[in-house]
Image (tube, grey):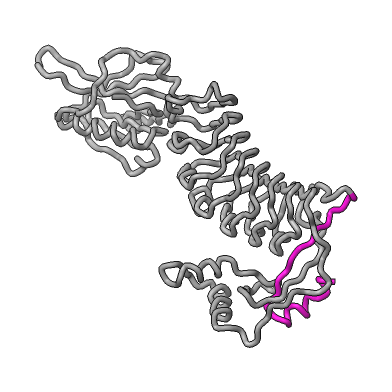
């Protein structure tokens, strides 16, 4: 039985000698091996740690020799085994969590002197080929090179599978818990599985030139909220992004070129860290009102079907306000927590999609809608011209929660 991970062996005598460990693990192969001493008829298990520099490895006794296991972060591929003799802590990291759990279970059995219910290796030096499983980057750009029967190295941090004719995301990729960059560009993928959101370290996702028609709400509400920094959805068939898309708070680079977008999420301004945005050659008639809250370095909206601002506003006011409208405005203005465990799910959706008035208050279905033009240089340092006429202005839609707000802001709508 073998485990591939990074290992750091720390002597507990170092602090007493005024020394410190270097604090960095090395790639290693851990093996549960069997040895048969002449004085004992039954072979017993021992731990064998081999590195690229020391393929012959170091052997550690296991039977009644483990002082403590530290497994608080085992789901992140980390654990520590504290031995009695020699007095060392064996720190494991960057391991496959499921493999690590199985390996630690076998080590526990060996410590208790029980029979280990897995095949044990022999005490032989590890081959150099074993360390190829620590590969951190793999680039595949053709069908013939795509692995069909062989798993991807669990240690991958960067995986590119382009021009491979994939029609769905390979589930084996979703087991790569260390993955930081995933490039699935130039394939035929139509739908993304929600389990991509389980890649907790994923920072860069490239889905350029596929057949995507939607981007799921489940992905927007996954752990990608805190990790994703770059997203390329260009050259797909997406018509709209969900409101929850604006929960990607760490997103800095977003590419939406060459889709069929008819609108951007109206809470776009919540993407506070967004610095690079390109949504060229779509079907956008206008920009959402919160777009003016962005602070970009680069903006490209060339080739959209922007409409000229309407002279007359769209009025959907109702006086007096309905109980639903009044309650919703109160909940949102006072930031009262809500959820499907408190109110019906469809009401949660209504609250999530509430519109923001220019005064900062909220409105659901009672509002005045107007459009105005905005110079895109007010939100971006570098702006690509929006048309062949050299324009840098685009229409922005605005909402007003009352007639008073509209009258006070009518100068903006001229």
Specify whether residue 316 is in view. Answer: yes
The answer to whether residue 45 is above or below residue 189 is above
Camera-side residue of 163 and 56: 163
Residue 152 image offset from top left, x and y in percent: 46, 28
Q: As displayed, is residue 271 above or below residue 40? A: below
Where residue 174 sits: x, y (%)? 46, 38
Query: Dividing the image into 4 quarters, which one contains the N terminus?
Result: top left
Viewer can see residue 177: no
At x 77%, y 50%, the residue is 301
Q: In this view, does 185 lie to the left or right of 30?
A: right
x, y percentage for residue 411? 83, 74
| Quarter of image, res 55 | top left
Is residue 8 found inside the magenta-colored segment of the image? no
Residue 124 appears left or right of 343: left
Q: How many labels does the image show?
A: 0
Is 398 part of what is drawn in magenta?
yes
Residue 238 sits above or below residue 396 on the image: above
Q: Residue furthest bottom?
A: 320
Q: Which of 83 and 133 is in front in this view?
A: 133
Query: As rendered, which of 350 and 21 lies closer to the eye?
Result: 350
Quarter of the image with the C terminus in it: bottom right
**Residue at 53% across / 27% down in the picture?**
137
Instruction: Specify start and end residues of the magenta stretch as a single range.
Output: 389-414
Q: Position of residue 321 (x, y in %)?
A: 61, 84
Q: Which of 131 and 323 is in front in this view?
A: 323
Question: Where on the picture, by quarter, is residue 28?
Answer: top left
- Name the residue located 41 percent from the left edge and 68 percent from the top edge: 341
């Amino acid at each position: 039985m073998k485990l591939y991970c990074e290992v750091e062996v720390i002597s507990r005598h170092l602090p007493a000698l005024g020394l410190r460990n270097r604090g960095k693990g090395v790639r290693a192969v851990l093996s549960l091996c069997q040895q048969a001493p002449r004085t004992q008829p039954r072979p017993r298990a021992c731990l064998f740690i081999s590195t690229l520099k020391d393929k012959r490895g170091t052997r550690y006794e296991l039977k009644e020799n483990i002082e403590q296991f530290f497994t608080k972060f085992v789901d992140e591929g980390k654990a520590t085994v504290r031995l009695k003799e020699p007095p060392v802590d064996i720190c494991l990291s960057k391991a496959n969590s499921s493999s690590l759990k199985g390996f630690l279970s076998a080590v526990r059995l060996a410590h208790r002197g029980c029979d280990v219910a897995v095949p044990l290796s022999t005490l032989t030096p590890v081959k150099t080929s074993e360390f190829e499983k620590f590969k951190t980057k793999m680039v595949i750009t053709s069908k013939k090179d795509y692995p069909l029967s062989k798993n991807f190295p669990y240690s991958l941090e960067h995986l590119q599978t382009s021009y491979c004719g994939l029609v769905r995301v390979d589930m084996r990729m979703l087991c790569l818990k260390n993955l930081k960059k995933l490039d699935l560009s130039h394939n035929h993928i139509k739908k993304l599985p929600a389990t991509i959101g389980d890649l907790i370290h994923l920072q860069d996702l490239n889905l350029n030139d596929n057949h995507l028609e939607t981007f799921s709400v489940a992905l927007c509400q996954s752990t990608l909220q805190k990790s994703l920094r770059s997203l390329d959805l260009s050259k797909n068939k997406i018509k709209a992004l969900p409101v929850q898309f604006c929960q990607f708070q760490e997103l800095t680079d977003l590419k939406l070129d060459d889709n069929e977008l008819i609108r951007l999420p109206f809470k776009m301004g919540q993407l506070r860290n967004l610095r690079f945005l390109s949504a060229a050659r779509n079907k956008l008639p206008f920009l959402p009102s919160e777009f003016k809250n962005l602070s970009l370095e680069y903006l490209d909206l060339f080739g959209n079907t922007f409409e000229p601002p309407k002279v007359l506003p769209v009025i959907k006011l109702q006086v007096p306000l309905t109980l639903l409208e009044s309650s919703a405005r109160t909940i949102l203005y006072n930031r009262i927590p809500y959820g499907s465990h408190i109110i019906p799910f469809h009401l949660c959706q209504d609250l999530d999609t509430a519109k923001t008035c220019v005064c900062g208050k909220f409105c659901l279905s009672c509002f005045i809608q107007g459009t105005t033009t905005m110079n895109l240089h007010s939100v971006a340092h570098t702006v690509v011209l929006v048309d062949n006429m050299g324009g840098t202005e685009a229409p922005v839609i605005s909402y007003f929660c009352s007639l008073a707000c509209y009258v006070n802001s009518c100068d903006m709508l001229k």
